[in-house]
Amino acid sequence: MRFFMACGIEIADETVMARNLFMNRRPAAVAAALLVLFLIFLAGGAGCARLRVTRPPIPWYFSIHGGEVGHDGTKSEAAFQKVLDLGGKGVRTDIFWAEVEPARDAWNDSLLDFYSGYVTLARSKGLDPMMIVSGAPGWAIELHSRDPKAFWKEYEEYVERVVRKVGDRVGNYQVWNEANHFIDPIDAADDWELFSRAGAIFRRLDPTATLYVNVNANWFGWEDAVTDWVSKAGSSIDVIGVDHYPGTWSPGSNSNWYPLERLVERINTPGDPWYGKKGAVLETGYSSWAPVLADEEGQKRWINESIPALHSKVREANRSNKYKVVLANYYLLLDPDTNGWGPEPHFGILHTDSSPKLGYDDLKRQITGLP
């Protein structure tokens, strides 16, 4: 007992006395204290050893699509338990327009109810749900090309329907998804209206909500796109998120976080249109889609190279700048189809059947900061 109380446990830049754990009589706390004592013994023996545990500088969220959990509450709960086990603090999920209004004015109320229950369940587990309004249905895309005025009216109706359904339990929303991506069906000249029109609805119905936008930072001209968005719809954007996939969509080193460096620089440069916004990494991950070329060993290696580099960049940025990077999001929790072809079905850290990939424990260590 004296040995334990005499030795501190250093966590990042703080020192907390192990005594605080040991003196807590709750079983979970005592168990944690005994674990720490065992680790101290391994780390240094009879001396007064200090065990460095580096905590991540930002909370991590995990992307989950409704289809990956079968739009089912029980499967959602199992997924949430995996997020918690990995050290996640939130989940990031689309309420796809195409799902909830597959035909004009034909609402899928059962799916809206599922997402409402999903949000409630996430909250009950201690996870923050970031919900995304995105994914225009085919009829809306056609309407946009034929009658833009009618499209915007339908879009606003969709956004309002979502906010009224889940807004009392959601504090973070992402508006659209990678509007600068070459596959996005909305004209680039109109992208700012996606944010401005949705933002007006969020500000009216959920005025304390934080509004995020994400940009595909592995695509040419991504900075110009963001500049256009914030110049025309800045009041509807609180956080700018970069989507960056070193090793999958971005060639070069796994530890290359140039888009994040640019984001931090621009949100902290007075006079820049980005100035005063907060930053985030809203998508990052690695697809284990090809044997040898990009497999689960590669994903594991990526986790142990890219995430520490990200943490280092964020720690440095947040220490020396006024406007911070507030979170990172891992894409993806579950493979949409482990047997599928190409990169997209294989970003999960879990297979489609929820079994862990080789890098699962490594990701858990990187995110929890525990050995």
Image (tube, rainbow, N blue to C red):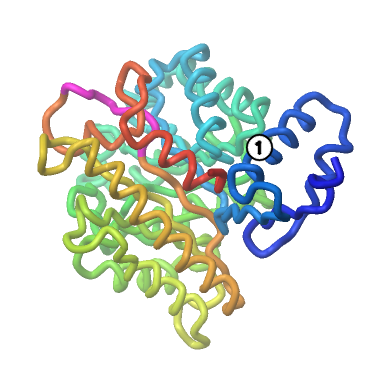
Quadrant of the image for the N terminus?
A: top right
- Of residues 106 and 315, the one drawn nearer to the viewer in this rendering: 315
Residue 230: where, in percent of width, then height? 44, 69
Seen from this angle, which residue lies furthest bottom? 271
Does 363 appear in magenta? Answer: no
Image point 28% across, 33% down: which residue? 137
Residue 175 position, x and y percent, is 45, 49
335 inside magenta stretch? yes
Label 1 residue SS: helix
Placement of 217 over or under 297, stated as above or below: below
Residue that appears at 52% across and 87% down: 270
Kindly identify which residue carries mark 1.
Answer: 38
How many numbered discs sit on the rendered protein?
1
Q: Main secondary structure of the magenta part?
A: loop
Q: Position of residue 225 (x, y in %)?
A: 31, 67
Residue stretch rendered in magenta on the structure: 332-339
Which of the two residues, 201 or 316, is positioned nearer the viewer here? 316
Q: Is residue 192 left or right of residue 203?
A: left
